[in-house]
Image (cartoon, grey):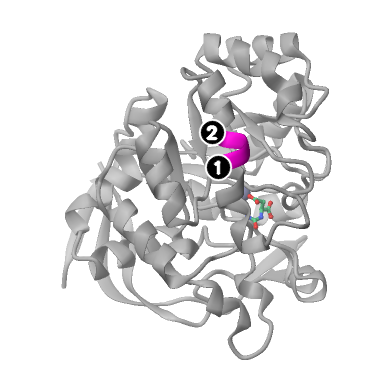
Amino acid sequence: MKDLTILKPDDWHLHLREGIVLKNIIKFSSEFFGRAIVMPNTKNPITSINKCISYKKSISEGLPENSKFEPLMTIYLTDETIKDELIEGFKNDVFFAAKLYPANATTNSSQGVKKIENLYEIFEVMEELGMPLLIHGEVTDPKVDIFDREVVFIDKELLPLIQRFPKLKIVLEHITTSYAVSFVQENNLGATITPHHLHINRNAMFFGGLNSDFYCLPVAKRENNRIALRKAATSGKKCFFLGTDSAPHLRQWKAFCGCAGIFNSPVAIESYIQVFDEEDSLDQFEKFASLNGPNFYNLPVNKEKIRLVSKSNEIPKFIEVIDNNKVVGQIKPFHAGEILNWQVEGIVN
Ligand code: NCD
Ligand code: ZN
């Protein structure tokens, strides 16, 4: 049996949702992650200090007793974002970072940014403040092929942005292409990589008929991209770090409207370490999971450790959503029904 003890990891890109779903799923992140950057694309997006404070409160109330999990909150940028609100929120530790969704790029992004140039004044102050900008890097032009949207975004939107704001601290979120892997390294950006983009390529969405279980945005691409992502994540390079993009949707909605998002927080650590094991890079796992993120964001690393052991781990087919002792819904986790080779054994002090 193999085993590995690493500093407690953090999740640098997480969707926690609200209400009953939040209450049911938060334990999957809070158990073995120290911190998480919480995405602001709630139904009514987190566009102000007040909304952010009340969202953070509902997250804290949903945490298991004595949990040390720390949610790092974000502001959802729109064309109307008020500069002073952003500055005040950042200076008072309400906002840890700002999230840019191009309008209509993904789930709950209809109020996102219509024209990046409209935010130049905001980026100027963020650059001055050292406030991180987290980017969903896809163009939304329907004429652009869905599999090319990340690459076109990099060329048309991201390149001009970094040329104009060379000191702006940027994370290109959930990268899916070899093109993004190279761009991030060449331009000193940070990038999160999800477990699902390390495991699946675009075939997964079409295997045995249209399968929305594997539909997320940005969509998984061709196999050569998956290989490049695995190489990047397991390289230990400082610019690549863990961000699950765990994005739960109730099964009835996922099956009905095929909404984008994969729920991986119940299996994320096991899913990632399996990739490192397969790539013979277990010695790089702690960098990706627990060191590179804090280094990028200038935060201390977590104090506690977790111990992982290689043993057969059957993943449940569904996670139940419970309200008042009644099952009110189900969410399918990533790797549902599969057997993974690793398990988190627990916290080590
Ligand atoms: C996310 C969601 O459901 O909120 N969906 C997804 O496919 N990743 C939004 C996002 O990060 O794009
Ligand atoms: Zn996301």
| Residue corresponding to mark 2 | 159
Q: Amino acid at mark 2?
A: Leu
Q: How many marks?
A: 2
Q: What predominant SS class does the magenta segment belong to?
A: helix
Assess mark 2: CB under 8 A from ligand 1? Answer: no
Position in image of residue 132 (x %, y %): 53, 25
Residue at left offset 57%, top offset 35%: 158
Q: Which residues are magenta?
A: 154-158
Q: Amino acid at mark 1?
A: Ile
Position in image of residue 205 (x %, y %): 61, 77
| Residue corresponding to mark 1 | 154
Q: Find out whether the residues at labels 2 and 1 contact each other: C-beta distance under 8 Å.
A: yes
Q: Quadrant of residue 8?
A: top left
Residue at left offset 24%, top offset 66%: 279
Position in image of residue 85 (x %, y %): 74, 13
Along the line of sight, which residue is nearer the eye, 291 or 99?
99
Tell me if 155 is positioned left or right of 228 in this view.
right
Assign the C terminus to one quadrant of the image: top left
